[in-house]
Every structure is written in C-alpha cells, then in structure tokens.
C-alpha cells in the first residue's frame, strides 16, 4: 500500500450525511464533517400520522457536497491529492423512482414537490398492505417462496412493497418511472457517471436483504410471480437488474465534474454502495460469532457466518441471509428493531408537550427567554430521566412495556403492531415509565438474540455502536443485564463511515481483501458493559413476562 494514502467514508444517515477522511494504513480519522438535510429538518414531504417519510434527492446532493468538501477542507494543504478511494453507505431500504437516464424523478421540475417521486425512507410504513400481499403470494402462488432467504416475512420497509404502493397510488409517477434505485446504488452511480439503470452496479447487500434477489432463482423473483402480486409490476423486472456486486468492488471512477465539486482528484476509486448497518458492522470489528448492534433511532443487528456453518439452514424471522452482504465470502445475517432510540424520543416529546404548546403563550417571560428555557429543558430531559431511572431497582417499577411503537422488525416483521405499557398506577412516575420503556427495548433485543440461537447460530460476543451505545450508560447497562452478556462499545464514533472507508480502500486496491483492510483500520473498543448477576437473574424472569404479554396482546394491537 502506498504510504500516506487516505480514503473517505461517506455515511448517509436518517437526518444527515457524514464524511470522514481516514488514514488507510491505520484507520485513524484525519478530518470529518456533518451536513444536515435541510428539507428533512423542516419536516417537508413527511406525514408521521400516515407513517409517510420521504426525502428529497436534493438533500442528499447538497449534503454530500457540503460534507465531503468540509472534511477535505480540514486536511493539511495538498493532502486531498492523497485520497485514493471513497466508500458509500446509506439507510435502506430507501428506493426512489428514476427515468431512463437514471435521474430521480424529483429532480425533474414537474415532480419536484411530489413526495411519491422522492426517495422512500427506510422507516416509511405506507406499504403495509402491499407487504401483506407479497407475503400471501409467496406462500400460495404455487412455486418457490421467494421470501425464504428474507426470514420468510417480507416487510413494508422494503423495496418491492414500497414500489408497488407508489405505482398503485400515483399514476403520474407510474407513467414516468422507468426503473427504481436504492439510495446506496444511486450515489456511487452519480459519482462515477453511470446512472443509466442498465449500467450501474447494484448492491448485493440491498438486493439480497430487501428485494428478494438470490442466485438460486437467477436474481430477482420471476415475472410470473411479480404479476401474481399485481399486474402493475409487469415488465419492471427487466428494467431493474440481474447481477449484483459486493461493496469491495469498484463501481467506477470519480468523474471530473464531481471531483471539482468535492475538491478531490478525478479518477479515484468509488466502491459499490451498501447499507449503513452492514458497513457499520465492518467498521465495528465484526467477525463470525459476534453480533453487532447498530443502535440509533432503530437498531440493526448484524452477524456473519461461514457458509459451512449455515449450510442449507433457513433462519426464519430475521431480515435476510445474504452471501457477501457484509463481508465478501461470508453469509451476512440481518435483524433489528423498528424503534429503539425513537421510543425514548417519543417519551421525551410526550413530556415536552407543555413546553412546546403552553410556554410560548405565557406573558411571564419574553420570547427569547422561553425559547432558551424550552431548548435547555428538552436538551436535558433524557439525560435526567436516565439518571433518575437508574436509581430504581430492576423489577421495582411494577410496569411492563412492549417496544413495538413503530411495529416489529424482528422476530418476524409485522409493522401493524403497536406498543403498550401495562401495570400503570397513580404512583407511576415519569422515571418509572421511562425505565419500563428502556427495559422493553432491551427485551426486544434479547428476542433477536434468542431467534439466532434457536437456529443454532452461536453468539460469542456482542458489540455495540451508534449514538445510544456511546451516550447512554443507563440504557446500555440495562441491555447488558437483560442479555446477560458483556457488551463492547466500538471506539470510533463514526463506525459506519469507517466501514465505508474500509471498502473504499479495497476498491482502490490498497488492500487485497476486506479482512486485510479491517485488520489494519479497525480502531478497537472504548469500553465494556458487564452484566450485574442479580439484575440479570431478575430480568430473566421479567423477559418471560414480556414474551407472554406480547403473545396475549399481539392480535389486539394489530386491530387498534
């Protein structure tokens, strides 16, 4: 490897895009920048009441340019010329409609304000009906069950369900959409000038986990199956793809136009994209036997296994088992929770209602003062709740909650489910309720571990990364106690971008394999949470109560 080479990892999250420049020899961060999505921050094109969450491609373009240029500006003079490659990760499944040139429809004037022409964010649940129909067709059409490598349940968060929902509800978009691309496929195609849907290199990670792609049936599900779901899907398969690529593959070279926009040298390698959780797992040090939890608004739980370990086994109830989706040559396994930090944020917003609605009406303080009060209190609320909840003993609240406030992703995806809190009394305080919610998210995490282990996939260690893992000691200690396992927290606070940079290094030829890049660029662990034996025993009992409560309420919660 050339001495002094740099690589860039670009991480497109839910709220922002981060660009991190790292030393390819050590993984040490040299510079970074975060750019927030302007339209998304203003709540544009979203309707939480309908579970509609859309993002304008201009947010991605503006964020990409601002983040990369900002990071490059933080380097010493001339250092940008040492950048050899770029890796890209995004949320997913986040597909968008494109025309025959690969241009997202929302970038055309006539569709610039149409949410259906934008990228459909991972947590958009408008396609629950369509997901149900896909699952029904997979079971009853008389041929192969194309969900069998997707955990045997297709989710409303995924590619085909979202596409079908838009095709049904927006004739104008349906007429204009030549094809569809995942966000993680579009960005590398854009940077390399290969946006043509027939030419761009599609992510194995995205296709295998979210689009029912598998080599067993020659790629995507056949036309015969798709039209059984709905005739509106007729002909689309031929305008999509059959071949996919692992993220260590070079998607192409950075075009002169984009090199100028990003202040980088033209021609550097751009790697095939993948989802943030999968690249984050690589940046967090994943190896066979390790379960990596990417903990933010939701969670993704990632494992890798040797092919001989998996064999012909189909692991039900997870979000897919895909050859090469995480580390080329290994089977990538994905699971997760549809809400984790979002559960805590919901409770904070609930408690903040008087601050947002009544404080602005007061005449006791001026506008500037009440705005400062609101910001200060809301900024401290979760931290104070965590401090008070930590003083309560395990099992002392008398409360039991279900963490399905945004549906359930694993085990067995079901976005029609709702959350619940039981055992409330007049003595149920805010810290007690908050503790019950934190415990519920931890029980949901344990259910994922159990799903893997019930299928014979051994979990030897747990690695955590993301905002919650780095910022909330209380939530992490509860999680360690509920799992009854130590949890190691990755040292890097940009593990997704670091993982993307590792793939960029391999695509640039700086390392022969991803494992070689990971060995040199992984940054280790910052701390370990060790379970308290007494709390772990108590939580073992409460976890069984959680499972019982879920079974009892499941049918009722779907109807609400």
Image (cartoon, rainbow, N blue to C red):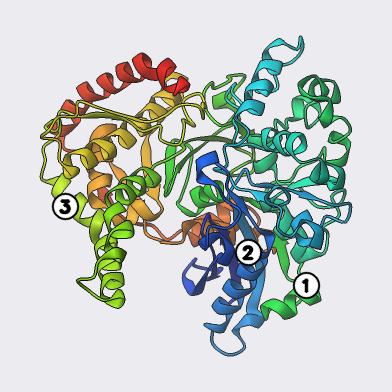
Relative to 459, is 137 on the left or the right?
A: right
CA distance for labels 1 and 3: 51 Å
Nearest to the eye among marks 2 and 1: give it. 2
Contact check, label 3 and label 2, Cβ < 8 Å? no
As drawn, the label of residue 267 is 1
- Which comes sooner in the sequence, label 3 or label 2? 2
Q: How far, Cα to Cα, is label 2 from label 1? A: 25 Å
Residue at which label 2 appears: 59
* Element on which disc 2 rests: helix
Query: Which residue does the numbered mark 3 point to in the structure image?
Result: 387
Q: In x, y percent, where is residue 239?
A: 87, 41
Q: Up-down: is 367 above or below 223?
A: below
Judged by depth in the image, the label closer to the viewer, 1 or 3, is 3
In the image, which is nearer the foreground, mark 3 or mark 2? 2
61 relative to 462 in the view: left or right: right
Residue depicted at 70% across the width and 58% down the height: 113
Which dot marks residue 548? none
Q: Quadrant of residue 538?
A: top left
Task: Name which of mark 1 and mark 3 comes first in the sequence.
Answer: 1
* Quadrant location, the N terminus: bottom right
Q: Residue at x 67, y 52 (%)?
A: 183
């Amino acid at each position: 490897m050339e001495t002094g080479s740099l690589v860039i990892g670009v991480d497109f999250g839910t709220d922002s895009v981060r660009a991190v420049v790292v030393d390819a020899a050590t993984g040490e961060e040299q510079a970074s920048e975060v750019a927030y999505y302007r339209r998304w921050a203003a709540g544009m094109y979203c309707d939480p009441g309908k579970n509609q969450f859309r993002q304008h491609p201009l947010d991605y373009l503006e964020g990409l340019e601002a983040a990369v240029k900002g990071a490059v500006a933080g380097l010493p003079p001339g250092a940008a010329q040492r950048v050899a490659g770029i890796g890209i990760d995004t949320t997913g499944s986040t597909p968008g409609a494109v025309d025959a040139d690969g241009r997202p429809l929302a970038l055309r004037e006539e569709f610039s304000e149409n949410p259906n022409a934008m990228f459909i964010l991972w947590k958009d649940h408008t396609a629950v009906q369509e997901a149900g129909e896909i699952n029904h067709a997979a079971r009853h059409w008389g041929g192969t069950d194309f969900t069998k490598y997707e955990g045997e349940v297709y989710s409303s968060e995924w590619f085909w369900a979202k596409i079908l929902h838009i095709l049904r509800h927006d004739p104008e978009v349906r007429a204009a959409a030549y094809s569809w691309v995942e966000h993680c496929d579009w960005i590398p195609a854009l940077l390399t000038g290969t946006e043509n849907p027939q030419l761009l290199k599609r992510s194995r990670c995205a296709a295998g986990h979210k689009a029912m792609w598998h080599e067993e049936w020659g790629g995507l599900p056949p036309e015969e199956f798709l039209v059984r779901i709905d005739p509106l899907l007729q002909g689309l398969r031929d305008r999509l793809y059959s071949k996919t690529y692992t993220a260590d593959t070079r998607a192409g070279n950075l075009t002169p136009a984009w090199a100028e926009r990003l202040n980088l040298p033209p021609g550097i390698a751009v790697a095939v994209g993948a989802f943030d959780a999968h690249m984050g797992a690589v940046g967090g040090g994943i190896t066979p036997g390790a379960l990596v939890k990417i903990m933010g608004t939701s969670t993704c739980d990632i494992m890798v296994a040797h092919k001989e370990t998996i064999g012909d086994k189909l692991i039900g109830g997870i979000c897919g088992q895909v050859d090469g989706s995480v580390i080329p040559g290994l089977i990538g396994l994905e699971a997760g929770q549809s809400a984790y930090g979002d559960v805590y944020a919901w409770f904070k917003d609930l408690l903040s209602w008087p601050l947002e609605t009544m404080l602005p009406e007061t005449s006791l303080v001026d506008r500037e003062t009440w705005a400062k009060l609101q910001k200060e209190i809301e900024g401290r609320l979760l931290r104070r709740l965590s401090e008070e909840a930590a003083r309560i003993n395990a099992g002392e609240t008398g409360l039991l909650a279900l963490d399905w406030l945004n549906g359930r992703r694993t085990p067995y995806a079901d976005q029609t489910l709702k959350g619940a809190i039981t055992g409330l009394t007049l003595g149920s305080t805010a810290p007690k309720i908050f503790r019950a919610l934190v415990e519920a998210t931890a029980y949901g995490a344990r259910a994922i571990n159990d799903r893997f282990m019930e299928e014979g996939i051994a979990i030897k260690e747990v690695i955590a990364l993301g905002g919650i893992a780095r910022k909330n000691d209380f939530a992490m200690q509860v999680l360690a106690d509920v799992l009854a396992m130590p949890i190691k927290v990755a040292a890097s606070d940009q593990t997704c971008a670091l993982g993307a940079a590792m793939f960029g290094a391999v695509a640039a030829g700086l390392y022969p394999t991803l494992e070689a890049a990971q060995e040199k660029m992984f940054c280790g662990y910052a701390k370990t949470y060790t379970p308290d034996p007494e709390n772990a025993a108590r939580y073992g009992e409460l976890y069984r109560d959680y499972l019982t409560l879920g079974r009892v309420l499941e049918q009722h919660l779907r109807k609400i």
